Image (cartoon, rainbow, N blue to C red):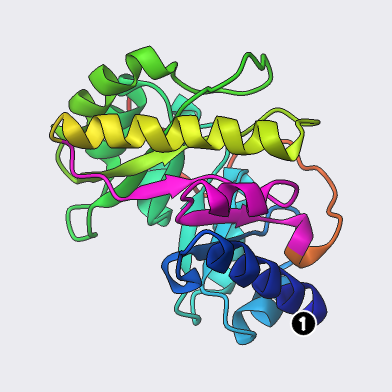
Amino acid sequence: MPQRLAHVRQELARAAHACGRNEDCITLVAISKGQAAAAVRELAHLGISHFGESYVQEAVPKLRLLADLPLTWHFVGRLQANKTRAVAENFAWVHSLDRLELAARLSAARPHFAPPLNLCLQVKLADDRGKGGVGPAEAEALAIGVARLPRLRLRGLMCILPAGLSATAQIAHFHRAQALLADLQRAGLELDTLSMGMSGDYVAAVQAGATLLRLGTALFGVRPGRPDSAPIPGAAAPSP
């Protein structure tokens, strides 16, 4: 794991410097779904403090096991209505918001003593049936609606690219997200975050202005899949 992290940091620094950016402005979010708490702890001891999970029923026990560490937890999976309470209560960030009704549920469930929940709108930049996201044309209306809700802080945009794109196509897609963020900023929204770039395309994402990189395999190695179907032990049912 130390070797993988060192390699990622070298590639990140090289890509940032090549386009005149400072790598210190880019945060690595280690995607720890399917990984044991011990692996997260090891990476945390190497200096990573941001971690991402996709499956709520896997994440909540893991968060509790690691509660002694000063970690920031990001929910990066497909957001489901019946999991919004658990997400609002346990995470600092949500990257995958694409519906106003889900934002309203997160707002209602966010504990009053917690800081505002950081949100990114997931935008769909290419036709990919397996991915969620709001279309670019609908992003501004959704962003304005989310920004009005209490206990939430809209931070920016997230995107996931289809597999198999060339480096040139990756950069072009990521630049579309960058341009959309600039459009929303010009519309008066105070946004500062581009969550884009995964293990196979993070170099292109850096070149297009990414501020959060979501890296799993590049840091942990290959991981098994995990469905999100089991209930969370002891979790209260979400309000309708």
Task: Quadrant for residue 181, please give it.
Answer: top left
Question: 222 and 200: which one is in front?
Answer: 200
Name the residue at the bottom extreme.
45
- Is residue 230 in the magenta section? no
Question: 99 and 64: which one is in front?
Answer: 99
Q: Please tell me whether residue 223 is drawn above or below residue 68 in the rendered image.
A: above
Could you say where residue 33 lies in the image, as x and y percent from the top left?
A: 69, 53
| Circle 1 residue | 2
Q: Residues within 10 Å of mark 1 (few under 14, many from 20)?
A: few
- Is residue 211 in the magenta section? yes
Question: 49 and 65: which one is in front?
Answer: 49
Would residue 178 appear left or right of 34 to someone viewing this image? left
Q: Please tell me whether residue 98 is drawn above or below residue 220 in the rendered image.
A: above
Looking at the rendered structure, the number of numbered marks drawn on it comes to: 1
Task: Quadrant for residue 148, please give it.
Answer: top left
The quadrant of the picture occupied by the C terminus is top left
Q: Residue at x 36, y 51 (%)?
A: 89
Q: Residue at x 42, y 25 (%)?
A: 98
Residue type beneath disc 1:
Pro
Could you say where residue 72 lies in the image, as x and y percent from the top left?
A: 45, 66
